[in-house]
Image (spheres, rainbow, N blue to C red):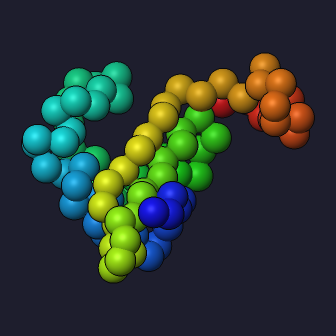
Amino acid sequence: MQVLPVDDSNLASVTAWLFERENYKWLDFRAGSQPINACLLKVMVQKPAHLLRVYTAEPDEAPAGLVALSNILLADCPIIPEAANVRP
């Protein structure tokens, strides 16, 4: 298994997953549950407040799922010293 950042190589797969009601119904981006489009997803992966990673399953290494954290406040993170200057 590998854990990889969301990037151009897997953006289409992640967007397709997050566009399915079965998946996006669990998400709330302060506007209620709504599908995530590629443009919004691309912006989200560039912001330090969001951490999105795809994971793969052996042997084909195709993306198998997504792990995401949001509302990350790095300013007070003791294990990431360079985060002290990052503000959301």
Q: How many marks?
A: 0
Between 67 and 28, the one nearer to me in the picture:
67
Between 12 and 3, the one nearer to me in the picture:
3
**Is residue 42 visible in the rendered structure shown here?**
no
Q: Residue furthest front?
A: 59
* Residue found 59% across the figure and 44% down from its top: 47
Q: Quadrant of the N terminus?
A: bottom left
Q: Quadrant of residue 55?
A: bottom left
In the picture, measured across the screen, residue 11 lies left or right of residue 76, that is left
* Residue found 64% across the figure and 41% down from its top: 48
Residue 54 to residue 49: above or below: below
**Is residue 17 visible in the rendered structure shown here?**
yes
Q: Quadrant of residue 79?
A: top right
Residue 6 to residue 74: above or below: below
x and y percentages locating residue 44 in the rendered image = 49, 47
Residue 68 to residue 29: above or below: below
x and y percentages locating residue 85 in the rendered image = 86, 33
In the picture, measured across the screen, residue 37 lies left or right of residue 19, that is right
Between 38 and 4, the one nearer to me in the picture:
4
x and y percentages locating residue 34 in the rendered image = 20, 37
In the picture, measured across the screen, residue 46 lies left or right of residue 86, that is left
In the picture, measured across the screen, residue 66 lies left or right of residue 6, that is left
x and y percentages locating residue 76 in the rendered image = 78, 20
Between 1 and 26, the one nearer to me in the picture:
1
* Residue found 89% across the figure and 35% down from its top: 81
Residue 62 to residue 37: above or below: below
Q: Residue furthest left?
A: 21
* Residue found 16% across the figure and 32% down from its top: 25
Q: Quadrant of the C terminus?
A: top right
